[in-house]
């Protein structure tokens, strides 16, 4: 059974329709990538899955159960955690305190502060540092670590490599197999298409609120992906 199913979901910001009849299934243990140009609707999809937005039509199933009217905090308890666009770490708190905040819905699982520091060794010496003093890459590692502290079964990552140096992006992506090995499924929104396609088991390309193309990356050609991305 799919861990997440989105069925015919249409999502609005008041009168503006941002998503049209979205259908997708995320299988347990996979990396599902959402790509597409600015404004295509990728962040809106993540917000709908995490519970910040409610679909006006259609539904969201997690483990086969409809969750579209469940509040966001209850979805965290069920095992859906988010790494938001722009990291959004708590800048007035230390690195360690940021991690502890992530554990407030204490689900059982492999992720604790020590295992997060093992995953991202760069964070360990910064434990007492205020999060505002971190670089973009350190903040992204912290945002992922904070989400992991909820011991999610599904982690939603928005714009995971935006504005980061290649060496930092590599460090983030190197963590993905460890997340999978610890029972976490990954749904990632990414602008760095080439990079994400090398790790994703499924890709959905968004165009103006619709999925223009989806499938297994190795079965899609560059031309197909480019056409779906730019709508040509
Ligand atoms: P980006 O890379 O810019 O984050 P995206 O694919 O994630 O792009 P969304 O942020 O989901 O796109 O935006 C989809 C559409 O919804 C865009 O046309 C955007 O202008 C609009 N939109 C996003 N947030 C709001 C909002 N709070 N109110 C009204 N419209 C919004």
Image: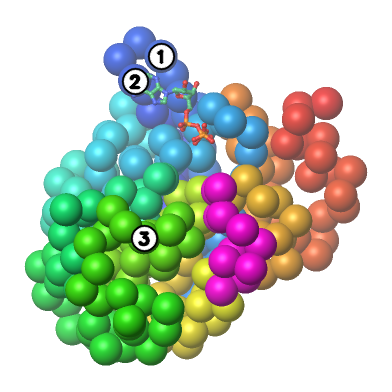
Distance from label 3 to label 2 (Cα)? 33 Å
Numbered disc in front, either 3 or 1: 3
Q: Is mark 1 within 8 Å of ligand 1?
A: yes
- Residue 26's x, y, as percent? 50, 61
Q: Is mark 2 within 8 Å of ligand 1?
A: yes
Secondary structure category for the residue under label 3: loop
Circle 2: is it few (<14), some (14-19), or many (20+) Cα within 10 Å?
A: few
Secondary structure category for the residue under label 2: strand
Circle 1: is it few (<14), some (14-19), or many (20+) Cα within 10 Å?
A: few
The answer to whether 133 appears left or right of 34 in the picture is left
Numbered disc in front, either 3 or 2: 3
For the record, the magenta segment spans 161-171
Report if residue 44 lies within the magenta region: no
Q: Which residue sits at x=31%, y=75%?
A: 126
**Which residue is labeled 1 in the image?**
16
Image position of 49 with respect to 33: above or below: above
The answer to whether 75 appears left or right of 186 in the picture is left
**Which residue is labeled 2 in the image?**
13
The answer to whether 196 appears left or right of 221 in the picture is left
Q: Which residue sits at x=34%, y=20%?
A: 13
Ligand 1 quadrant assignment: top left
Q: Which residue sits at x=37%, y=51%?
A: 87
Identify which residue, 182 or 175, lies in the foreground. Answer: 175
Q: Is any part of residue 94 visible from this angle?
A: yes
Quadrant of the frame with the C terminus: top right
Most extreme residue toward the top is 15
Q: Which residue sits at x=23%, y=52%?
A: 91
**Which residue is labeled 3 in the image?**
134
Q: Marks 1 and 2: CB-CB under 8 Å?
A: yes
């Amino acid at each position: 059974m799919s861990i997440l199913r989105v069925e015919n979901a249409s999502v609005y910001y008041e009168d503006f329709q941002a998503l049209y009849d979205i259908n997708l299934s995320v299988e347990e243990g996979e990396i599902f990538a959402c790509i597409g140009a600015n404004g295509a609707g990728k962040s809106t999809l993540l917000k709908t899955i995490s519970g910040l937005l409610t679909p006006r039509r259609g539904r969201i199933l997690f483990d086969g159960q409809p969750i579209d009217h469940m509040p966001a905090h209850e979805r965290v308890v069920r095992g859906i955690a988010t790494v938001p666009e722009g990291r959004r770490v708590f800048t007035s708190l230390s690195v360690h305190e940021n991690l502890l905040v992530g554990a407030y819905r204490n689900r059982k699982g492999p992720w604790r502060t020590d295992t997060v520091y093992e995953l991202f060794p760069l964070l360990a010496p910064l434990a007492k540092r205020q999060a505002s003093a971190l670089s973009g890459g350190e903040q992204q590692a912290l945002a992922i670590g904070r989400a992991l502290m909820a011991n999610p079964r599904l982690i939603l990552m928005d714009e995971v490599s935006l504005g980061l140096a290649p060496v930092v992006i590599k460090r983030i992506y190197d963590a993905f197999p460890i997340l999978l090995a610890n029972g976490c499924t990954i749904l990632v929104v990414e602008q760095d298409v080439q990079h994400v396609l090398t790790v994703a088991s499924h890709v959905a390309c968004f165009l103006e609120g619709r999925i223009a193309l989806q499938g297994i990356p190795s079965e899609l050609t560059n031309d197909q992906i480019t056409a779906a991305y730019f709508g040509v």
